[in-house]
Image (cartoon, rainbow, N blue to C red):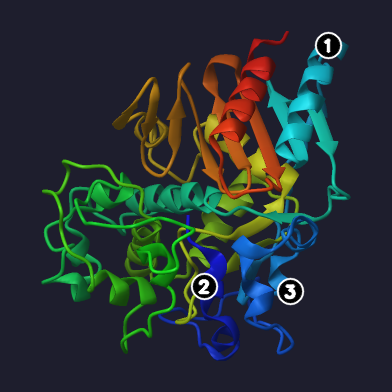
């Protein structure tokens, strides 16, 4: 997940033109307000109150693309509430996580929906790296639509400007699983890390910032042999989808995710200096739409992706040990369930065994923490084991 200390290039975003896309109905580009400063955009350094306020209105601080809600939003019936003991445990975990909201759907019905921190059902909350799971779902859609012939294709088939770089010879699937073998530093606290610099680079003409930055990287292992978490690679995956389809990620998501999943609210997705959506981060939707995304994925995400797509996308294609793994931009967990996750505690968790989806948005007091990861695992297990 990127160090949003970068601020997506701050005020430069306001003057960017959308690259390689054309205007589409129900899609509009939003500009960063002139009053927003670099300091306003130092996300990792916002205090608790600032995060709680701004995470629900990132469009007021960053440029992006907004697409309209589904014309026929999906509605869920009320399910049986959890028992008092389970709810008490859940409340304790939500307090530890400093969660803004949770929604649990089981058997297609809402068993729990709760809001905290002044957040409400009509507001959006930023995703951070939960956006990665959206981008990989769009990859599946591009495969089904025939825009991407095979995940075994070299990335240079879609991004020819990467020829001669460390990504030459890397496949689309290896980018999707973050096993390119390219060296990378994802330290959010280090201002000199790759993740802290990738969206500071001035893009070359005709390239996205991610492609321009990828030119600076070196290989440390043969492609396919080493897993290393790299937000750049999801950005590149988004660039591959955009290049293959000729559409922005947000516009493609309107057709392939927002409408078929039945989102009730509009989707906002940040853009980089070239005006393209940032595949690795930062779309904003309602809590209920995170839950709709999870339910739709649980059901197979039809008709958008190939049949059985999540049998690989949500599987531990990379074994990270102790039951944890990584698929196509989805994390897999002990117990056979999987999900998207982002810093500061955003989660869309899909539990096929229990026909359950858990959506959580939070304002962790730190970007990530092992103790908080343990708490959310306890929360998940409490809900999964409850009757």
Q: Please, what secondary structure does the residue beneath circle 1 have?
A: helix
Q: Which of the 4 image quarters holds residue 52?
A: bottom right
Q: Residue at x 69, y 66 (%)?
A: 58
Q: Earlier in the sequence, mark 2 or mark 3?
A: 2
Report whether 122 appears left or right of 166: right
User: Position of 130 compared to 142: left or right?
Assistant: right
Residue 234 x, y percent position in the rendering: 39, 56
CA distance for labels 1 and 3: 40 Å
Q: How far separated are the C-alphas under marks 2 and 3?
A: 16 Å
Q: Is residue 70 visible?
A: no
- Crowding at dot 1, Cα within 10 Å, few <14 / some 14-19 / many 20+, comes out as few
| Residue 369 higher or lower than 157, as above or below | above
Q: Name which of mark 2 and mark 1 comes first in the sequence.
A: 2
Crowding at label 3, few (<14), some or many (≥20) Cα neighbours within 10 Å?
some
Tag 2, which secondary structure?
helix
Residue 282 numbered mark, or none: none
Residue under label 3? 60
Asked where in the image residue 23 lies, by quadrant, the reply is bottom right
Q: Residue 164: image x %, image y %?
A: 11, 72
Identified at 63% across, 23% down, the residue is: 380
User: Which SS class for mark 3?
Assistant: helix
Q: Name the residue that disc number 2 marks.
A: 6
Q: Position of residue 163 (x, y in %)?
A: 14, 71
Residue closest to the eye, 12 or 5: 5
The quadrant the C terminus occupies is top right
| Above or below: residue 329 compared with residue 182 | above
Asked whether, in this view, residue 15 is left or right of residue 34, the answer is: left
Q: Which residue is painted at 54% across and 88% down in the image?
A: 12
Residue that mark 1 sits on: 85
Against 326, is 92 above or below? above
Which label sits in the foreground, 2 or 3? 2
């Amino acid at each position: 997940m990127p160090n949003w200390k970068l601020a997506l290039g701050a005020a430069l975003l306001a003057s960017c033109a959308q690259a390689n896309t054309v205007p589409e109905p129900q899609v509009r580009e939003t500009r960063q307000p002139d009053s927003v400063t670099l300091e306003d955009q130092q996300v990792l350094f916002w205090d608790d109150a600032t995060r709680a306020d701004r995470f629900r209105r990132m469009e007021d601080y960053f440029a992006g693309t907004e697409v309209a809600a589904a014309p026929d939003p999906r509605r869920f019936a009320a399910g049986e509430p959890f028992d008092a003991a389970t709810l008490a445990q859940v409340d304790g975990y939500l307090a530890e996580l400093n969660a803004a909201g949770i929604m649990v759907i089981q058997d297609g019905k809402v068993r729990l929906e709760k809001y905290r921190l002044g957040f409400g059902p009509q507001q959006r909350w930023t995703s951070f790296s939960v956006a990665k799971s959206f981008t990989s779902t769009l990859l599946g859609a591009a495969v089904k639509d025939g825009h991407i012939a095979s995940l075994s294709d070299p990335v240079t088939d879609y991004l020819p400007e990467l020829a001669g770089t460390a990504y030459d010879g890397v496949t689309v699937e290896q980018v999707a699983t973050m096993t390119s073998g390219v060296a990378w530093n994802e330290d959010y606290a280090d201002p000199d890390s790759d993740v802290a610099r990738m969206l500071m680079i001035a893009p070359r003409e005709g390239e996205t910032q991610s492609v321009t930055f990828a030119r600076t990287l070196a290989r440390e292992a043969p492609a396919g042999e080493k897993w290393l978490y790299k937000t750049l690679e999801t950005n590149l995956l988004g660039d591959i989808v955009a290049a293959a389809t000729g559409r922005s990620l947000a516009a493609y998501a309107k057709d392939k995710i927002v409408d078929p999943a039945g989102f009730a609210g509009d989707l906002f997705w940040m853009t980089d200096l070239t005006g393209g959506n940032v595949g690795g981060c930062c779309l904003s939707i309602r809590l209920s739409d995170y839950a709709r995304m999870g339910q739709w994925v649980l059901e197979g995400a039809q008709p958008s992706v190939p049949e059985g797509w999540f049998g690989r996308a949500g599987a531990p294609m990379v074994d990270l040990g102790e039951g944890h793994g990584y698929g196509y931009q989805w994390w897999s967990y002990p117990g056979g369930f999987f999900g998207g996750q982002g810093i500061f505690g955003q989660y869309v968790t899909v539990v096929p065994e229990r026909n359950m989806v858990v959506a959580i948005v939070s304002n962790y007091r730190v970007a990530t923490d092992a103790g908080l990861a343990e708490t959310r695992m306890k929360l998940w297990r409490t809900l999964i084991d409850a009757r």
